[in-house]
Amino acid sequence: MNAEEIHSRLQARFGDAVTPLDVSSHDPWIGVDPEHIDAVTAHCKNDPDLDFKSLMSLSGVDDGENIKVVYHLFSFTKRHRIVLKVTVSKAAAVTQSVTGVWRGANWFERECYDLFGVRFEGHPDLRRLLLPDDWEGWPLRKEYVFPAEYGGVDNRRDYSV
Amino acid sequence: MTLYNQLPPTFVTTNIDKVMSWGRASSLFYLLFGLACCGIELMQTGGPRADVDRFGSVPRATPRQADLMIVAGTVTLKMGSRVKLLYDQMPHPKYVISMGSCSNCGGLFDLGYSVLRGIDKLIPVDVYVPGCPPRPEALTEALLQVQDKIHRERYLARA
């Protein structure tokens, strides 16, 4: 099944919750409303014609104004793939967790929370994954300012970057 | 007549500091502490080609049995507190080799937000080994430098 067919199936079922297909980039992608991402992904996984049993990657992108959470889906049986994107604002970066759909999303979402500060509603254990628990800020956001000090260690540079 | 001629030929005369230094320098047990790609070179240094075992250095899995800490690799700020903890657990006298550019000064990852710029911000360092990563010969040389330092010390006479 190609990207257009996948998109038409999702749009037939979810209507306005999914945006038109974007084919401008290498991987065609579909925008999804943050409120419905768990339902959309559950349908992608459980519909026998879509059969996206694999969440290859869950990542985040800071496009300057908003944060996009990017889901790369793949089907082993159908050998087709699709990309879903959820756009959330930086001020209220909240979306739905997909850990109920793929359990492997657990650490993906923790990493995304760790580095972008996206909160995933319904996640069973949303803590920082890589950075220490007492770290401040979200390092992969564009406006992030490096800490001058951590744990009593001076982290400033004596030269400009 | 010298003292030497009065003793049986199986005796040597020395002083206790030199014997202690000789023993300490010839049994530098190092803490296994590979943090990044330098850890691979550290393994090679302990392997059959470089073989620091011939200088009496063998790896230890716990800091409580180690004399020497070889910090091999990038130290993040999160790891920094652990490095300090492990260093504090080592018994005196203890020595530190900072292996590679990362643990010397941050190296390649100097611009990272989470990277400690030099392990000497946390613990005292005896020998810095430059390189990215240093070859086993370089680390062997650093080990010999630590042995030199031990030989020059007067441990019993310390303040």
Image: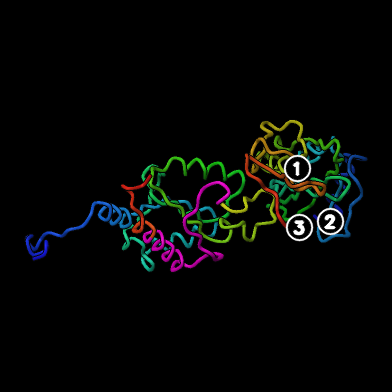
At which x and y percent is residue A85?
82, 47
Rendered image quadrant of residue A125: top right
User: Left or right: where does residue A74 sit relative to residue B144?
Assistant: right
Circle 1 SS class: loop
| Residues indicated by labels 2 and 3 sit on the same polypeptide chain | yes
Residue under mark 3: which chain is it in?
Answer: A
Check the picture and name the quadrant holding the C terminus of chain A.
bottom right
Circle 2 SS class: loop
**Marks 2 & 3, CB-CB < 8 Å contact:** no
At which x and y percent is residue A114?
71, 41
Residue at 33%, 60% in the rendered image: B53
Q: Is residue A23 above or below residue A30?
A: below
| Residues indicated by labels 2 and 1 sit on the same polypeptide chain | yes
Residue at 75%, 40% in the rendered image: A137
Residue under mark 2: which chain is it in?
Answer: A
Disc 2 and disc 1: Cα gap in Å?
28 Å
Q: Which residue is label 2 attached to?
A: A28
**Along the line of sight, the residue nearer the viewer: B142 or B47:** B142
Mark 1 belongs to which amino acid?
Trp
